[in-house]
Image (spheres, coloured by chain):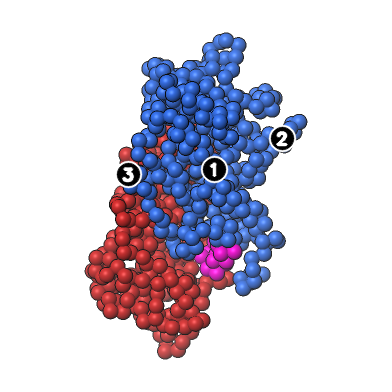
Chain colours: A blue, B red
Amino acid sequence: MKANYTRPLDLKHGRVDMNHGAGGRATAQLVSELFARAFDNPWLAQGDDGAVLPAPEPGERLVMATDGHVVSPLFFPGGDIGSLAVHGTVNDLAVMGARPLYLSASFILEEGYPLADLKRIVDAMAEASRSVGVPVVTGDTKVVEQGKGDGVFIATTGVGALPPGRAPGGASARPGDVVLVSGSMGDHGMAILAVREALAFDSEIRSDSAPLACLVETLYAAVPADAIRVLRDPTRGGLATTLNEIARQSGAGMLIDEAAIPVHPQVEAACELLGLDPLYLANEGKLIVVCAPEHAEAALAAMRAHPRGRDAARIGTVIADDHHFVQLRTALGGMRMLDWLSGEPLPRIC
Amino acid sequence: MKANYTRPLDLKHGRVDMNHGAGGRATAQLVSELFARAFDNPWLAQGDDGAVLPAPEPGERLVMATDGHVVSPLFFPGGDIGSLAVHGTVNDLAVMGARPLYLSASFILEEGYPLADLKRIVDAMAEASRSVGVPVVTGDTKVVEQGKGDGVFIATTGVGALPPGRAPGGASARPGDVVLVSGSMGDHGMAILAVREALAFDSEIRSDSAPLACLVETLYAAVPADAIRVLRDPTRGGLATTLNEIARQSGAGMLIDEAAIPVHPQVEAACELLGLDPLYLANEGKLIVVCAPEHAEAALAAMRAHPRGRDAARIGTVIADDHHFVQLRTALGGMRMLDWLSGEPLPRIC
């Protein structure tokens, strides 16, 4: 059947076909009737091969971050690949200390994928983008044959502006610094796993997928910029892997208090059932802050006053350690090494 | 078999496994031993969630462009997905009139893909990036299960700086303007098709995959910035589709002289054999320029003096036409409409 591109796109019953990625009329129609309409902003409306954008303020540096999103399933409690793609990249910019400015989106679609589902994803992405105030200014669409993809992959890239004086980075943690987290660990990873394994719990476990840009700005408003040594969002590999990365980058060790780490009771129960550790599960809306000790209380108070940091907690300290080990003081009073994630990963979590 | 990440990555016989995308030690090893080594630059070496970069010069605007690359096969005469990913995005920035500054790369790998082939791709990408002087400053790697991808997909995003006074855009073509092309049409599309269909010709048809940034700068050095109305690289959909896009955006028509359009004899012969039109085949290293008539000769001379524009030609003019049709004066003296690409596309060409 030859498609008729003079009719509107059938967003109820239509499916992605190879023509949608061929660069002709069908591509133009998909872009104008779906993407441009959902993401509607003046830069995207330029309709050229890229977007011309205002540069950062004088004195600000550029920040650039990119993320490929291949989460499976595409829809899950608390979000979908569209909102996740926005939050993931906005958060990568935020934890660099940057104000997120612009996003690009590159879609790799599988032939036969329902346009109605694609529309749900694009609408969620547009809503997340509007809600955090970071427009999708340019994009690209490719289509691969059935069996050569998995529905929808989205690669997002973000550009932000780094105000003068801000320089958080994994290498800046030093002994005596305090380690804070903005809330409960493991929600996103367990939400995905629960859907994938069709686990049923009393109450649904929801992904924490959310933007962190506003929480980061709140933090910078509360304490001096140089007191914020490291910002990270503990995504793939979870808290344990992120703390090990910081330890390696800074050449220091860490002493973490297990009882102080917030974990939702349902996530904890699900982890016990499955023999998993919530500290290795991905988060998509949580912040790790390594802070100078004299400003730790102010940072914690500022986070707790923000809706995305209500359950923020002080979980440990950076210590001198030539082996840069991350040690966990367990709830029972013993000590164990918190190693990198290795073996048995949870694939396609984001 | 549990992989041992304390040994170096086996870049000869190893394969991509799900762990390489899980965000733990295996991901860190792939990044440090393959990507960071190949792309080696101070921004990527920051090792954080993104890169902090110098902003454009005062008065310059930002330009952002993105492209997903799903070309099949991954290797072809004249290039591979790695070099193509660099050229494609650099060219999107160049045709906006921008100086390309930075690239990001998001890899979606299929489980089981040979690391030796991935290394060839990454090395070609790094070489293309160095050769055009645009570093890959940040990246991301995801892995999908065998049968859920197709070896390697690469989404690249570019950021560039737009010097004051430059504003090429599809809407700026006006009646009387001259249409130039920088060289032969259809080489990339036919090179891919020849490999895919295992066509054998006397001489190999090579992709024209190449960066256009230097050719664009040469052009701006030769004529006033406002004389350059439109710049485009005719990729998917070829020259015919790109001219139609410009006609639609500018609300004008075009009169193109078929005999003036450069096409390599082998490409022409292959097109005749396959019943294809070279004007609909993708190009990955060619420029379309719509230029003010009084500067067209200078622009053409500047292009011809540049190695990437030796075969540049004047192929037609923009005309007033409320239907914004693109008309082709055929080699035999007749006239035909050059329509958008529709139906029968060549999928996965870039």
Q: Residues within 10 Å of mark 2 (few under 14, many from 20)?
A: some
Tell which subunit mark 3 falls on.
A
In the image, taking residue A325 as reference, residue A31 lies left or right, namely: right
Q: Looking at the picture, which amino acid does disc 3 mark?
A: Gly
Boundaries of the magenta span: A21-33
**Which residue is rendered at x = 48% and y = 55% of the image?**
A137
Indicate whether residue B197 is drawn in magenta: no
Compared with A167, B337 (above or below) is below
Under circle 2, the secondary element is loop
Between the C-alphas of marks 1 and 2, the distance is: 21 Å
Q: Name the residue under label 2.
A: A204
Residue A87: which disc?
A: 1
Q: Is mark 1 on a helix, strand or loop?
A: helix
Quarter occupied by residue A333: top right
User: Which residue is tagged 3?
Assistant: A59
Is residue B221 left or right of A235 when viewed as pictured?
A: left
Q: Residue B327 or A101: which is nearer the viewer?
A: A101
